Amino acid sequence: MWEGLARAFQEGGVFMYAITGALGFGVAVILERLYWLLVRFNVDGRKFYGELRRLIEAGDLEAARDLCGDAPLPRILRAGIEAALGAGGTERAVQNAVDEEALAVIPKIEKRIHYLSMIANVATLLGLLGTILGLMQAFQAVAGADPSQKAAMLARGISMAMNTTAYGLLVAIPCMVFYAFLQSKAAKIVDEIDEYSVKLINLLTTSRREG
């Protein structure tokens, strides 16, 4: 099996190395984004907001602030709580603090994910380019090569065409799958930020009026 893969890689020519470079870049982006989105940024928004709401309704804003960690959702909500603890503490001040922190945090959630779509397209196009050059080589063999070398050149051209196409697609398909998955996960985090930011602002405003 490994010998066959090594032979196919060699027959694919220089484009196989270019596609491998795209693969390496894609794997690095996937692993990095999986770590951040599934480990560092992963927060159960409903559970976290429930605990935060309990503390705020009890009037303990300091404890609510201390509950917030460094993940995007807690970080943004902490900015709102700190604004409520400040001298102004108005609804506008809380809204501005939440919006300002969201502008700083949300790009960190979405960054580099779009590279996976680009990598998938580049891998596919490199495979297509290898296919075209391989077929050109095969046609040249049929048209003008020495009869003793024609069969070998034809086989080499077809092998280059097929191997680069297959390898390009093998790289592109997983990249597109992970792109869709990571994009969905990032969108879920952003949606939770939007939802619980509004709920926090309303909660702080109501608590302040009642207080």
Image (cartoon, rainbow, N blue to C red):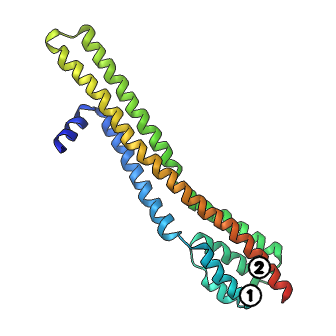
Residue extending furthest toward the right: 209
Q: Residue 62 versus residue 53: which sits nearer the camera?
A: 53
Q: Pick the quarter of the image with the N terminus.
A: top left
Query: Which residue is the site of mark 1?
Result: 57
Say whether marks 1 and 2 touch (CB < 8 Å). Answer: yes
Please tell me whether residue 129 is drawn above or below residue 92 in the rendered image.
above
Identify the residue shown where x is 57% and y is 73%.
44
- Which residue type carries mark 1? Glu
Q: Which mark is residue 163?
A: none
Q: Is residue 10 left or right of residue 24?
A: left
- Which residue type carries mark 2? Leu
Measuring from the top left, give residue 128's x and y in whole percent.
40, 29
Identify the residue shown where x is 71% and y is 81%.
82
Q: Pick the quarter of the image with the C terminus.
A: bottom right
State the count of labels: 2
Identify the residue shown where x is 72% and y is 66%.
99
Identify the residue shown where x is 49% and y is 43%.
118
Measuring from the top left, give residue 50's x and y in whole percent.
65, 81
Disc 2, SS:
helix
Please tell me whether residue 123 is drawn above or below residue 65 in the rendered image.
above
Mark 1 or mark 2: whose residue is earlier in sequence: 1
Measuring from the top left, give residue 109's x and y in whole percent.
57, 61
Residue extending furthest toward the left: 148
Query: Quadrant of residue 137 in the image?
Result: top left
Q: Is residue 46 left or right of residue 138?
A: right
Query: Which residue is the site of mark 2?
Result: 203
